[in-house]
Amino acid sequence: MKTASLSVAEGMAASLGQVADNLGVTVDALADKAIRRYLRQEAEKKVQREEQHFRAQHAQLLEQYSGQFVAMHDGCVVDSDADELALYLRIRQKFPMIGILIKQVTPALEEVWVMRSPHLEYD
């Protein structure tokens, strides 16, 4: 595992130390968990933005990629495939930590429902 040093304001460091002590974890573990959560939230927001791009471009996408799965990044199709798993594996190699929308282009736009539910986190 690669490590990096981060500089934080003195007050922030003290707050992290207090919370870590209260939780019985190290400051490093607490910071790692907080950063992972933040990155996951940002990836989810990015995927929602890509969904908006997908909807706005649906007619053009349907002409070019009908029935295929497309991967959208920054409002553009960066890859496509009839095999969703193959596309997913390629995209994870190209963009390992970035939220990318992978969606099948079908004639009907699906309604998007976002449901929040508890999930397990493993340390």
Image (spheres, rainbow, N blue to C red):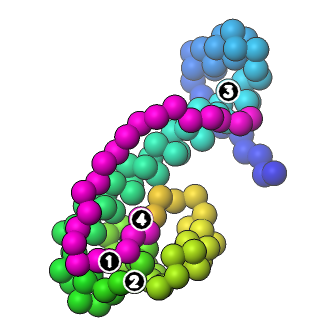
Q: Which residue is mark 2?
A: 68
Residue depicted at x 21% and y 83%: 60
Residue 105: which disc?
1
From what the image shows, is residue 58 above or below residue 49? below
- Whether pointer 2 and pointer 1 mark residues with C-beta atoms closer than 8 Å, the reply is yes
Q: Secondary structure at mark 4?
A: strand
> How far across and down, in percent of the image, does residue 115 sit?
37, 40
Residue depicted at x 23% and y 68%: 109
Q: Quadrant of the image for the C terminus?
A: top right
Task: Give the magenta range.
Answer: 101-123
From what the image shows, is residue 73 above or below residue 107? above
- Whether pointer 3 and pointer 1 mark residues with C-beta atoms closer than 8 Å, the reply is no
Instruction: Tell me how far mark 2 sits from mark 4, CA to CA.
Output: 13 Å
> How far across and down, in percent of the image, does residue 102 sit?
43, 69
Instruction: Tell me how far mark 2 sits from mark 3, CA to CA.
Output: 41 Å
> How far across and down, in percent of the image, does residue 92 sit?
60, 68
Residue depicted at x 70% and y 14%: 23
Q: Which residue is mark 4?
A: 101
From what the image shows, is residue 40 above or below residue 18? below
Marks 4 and 3, the one that precedes in the sequence: 3
